Image: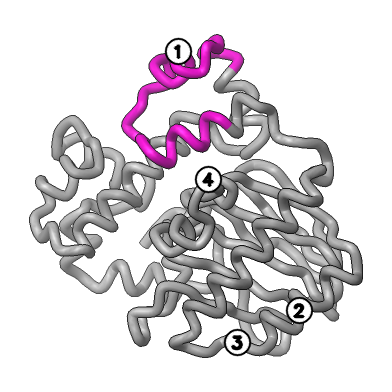
Amino acid sequence: MQCAQRPLYQRFLPEAGGTSAHVWKFSLEFGGRRPRHFHDEPEINLIVSGSATFGIGDLVVEARAGELLAFPAGQDHALLDTSADLYLFAIGLSPQLSAEALRTERHSMGVPAHVRLPAAELKPLISQAGAIVDEFGRAQQVAELWQRMAWLRQRHAVRLGGGLHALTRRALALLSDEPRLERDALAKALRASPCALSRYFHNDLGTTLVQYRTRLRLLRMIRAFDEGEGELKRAASAAGFGSYSQCHRVFQAELGCSPRAFFSSDLRERMQSAYAG
C-alpha cells in the first residue's frame, strides 16, 4: 500500500452521521495507535493522565498530564510511545466549523501549540470533553469546547520548548487562506528572506514549507472532490494545481497512489483503517 515512512491521509472525523466535530478517547485499554498521518481537520490532544511521546514532522515532543497539544491541518503526527496509564482526549472540527466557532480568531487553531494548563482550568475541560466523548450529533458542544481551548491557548501562550517564530505564525495564516502561494511570493508578502522563512518554518513544524504547502493543496483537492466537484481535473484546478499532471505527481509523492486509484478503489478506506504495528 505505502512505504512505512510515508504519512497516511486519515480523516479525523468519523463518517457516521456526517458529523463536523468529534471527541475521541485514547488509552492502551481502548485499542491501537494510528500510524503517522495527517488530515484536513485541526486537532487538539488533551492529556488527562500519564505521558506520551509524539512524532510531529521530524520533531519528537514529550507531553504529560495537564498539557495540551495542537496540530494544524496538514501537520503529520504520530503517537510514538506512551506510559501505561496514558489517557487523552483528541478533539477535532471541520475547518469550516472551526472558523465559524472562532470567528475573528479563526487562524489561532491553524498554529501548532504545546501548553501546560493549571489544574483549576484543566478540570472543567476534562469534564466537558468527558460528557461528549465518542457521541455523535454533539457538534455545538464540541465547538464550545473548541472555543474554550482556543482561549486557554492564548492565555497560556508560552509554548513548551519555546515559542513559534513570528514568520512561521504569519506564514501559516496566509497559507490557510491561499495554499497556492509560492515560497518567494509568501516571503515577499511577509517582507522576509525566503531562506529565513524556510528555516524558521522547518524548525517550528518539523516539516518543510514546500511540503506543508503541497499537502494543504492536496487536502483542498480531496475536499473539493468530496464536496461534489466530481471531476478530477476540476477538483485539481479548484485546489490551485497548475495542471492535472502536477496534481498527479503530488498524489503519487504524498500518498503513494494516483488520484484515480485513491477515489475509485478501496485504497482510501484501507488507508483509513490502518493501525501502527
Amino acid on which disc 2 is placed: Ile
Residue 50, quarter of picture = bottom right
Residue 172 image point, x, y percent:
52, 36
Q: Does the magenta stretch include residue 174?
A: yes
Residue contact at pointers 4 and 3, CB within 8 angstroms: no
Q: In this view, does 222 lie to the left or right of 131?
A: left
Residue contact at pointers 1 and 3, CB within 8 angstroms: no
Disc 2: which residue? 126
Look at the magenta stretch and give its main secondary structure: helix
Q: Residue at x 78, y 51 (%)?
A: 155
CA separation, marks 1 and 4? 20 Å
Query: What segment carries the magenta color?
Result: 170-196
Q: Can residue 191 be seen in this view?
A: yes
**Which of the image's four quarters has the N terminus?**
bottom left
Disc 3: which residue? 132
CA separation, marks 4 and 2? 24 Å
Q: Which residue is drawn at 75% across and 61% down?
A: 68
Q: Residues within 10 Å of mark 3 (few under 14, many from 20)?
A: some
Disc 4: which residue? 107
- Label whose residue precedes the other's in the sequence (4 or 2): 4
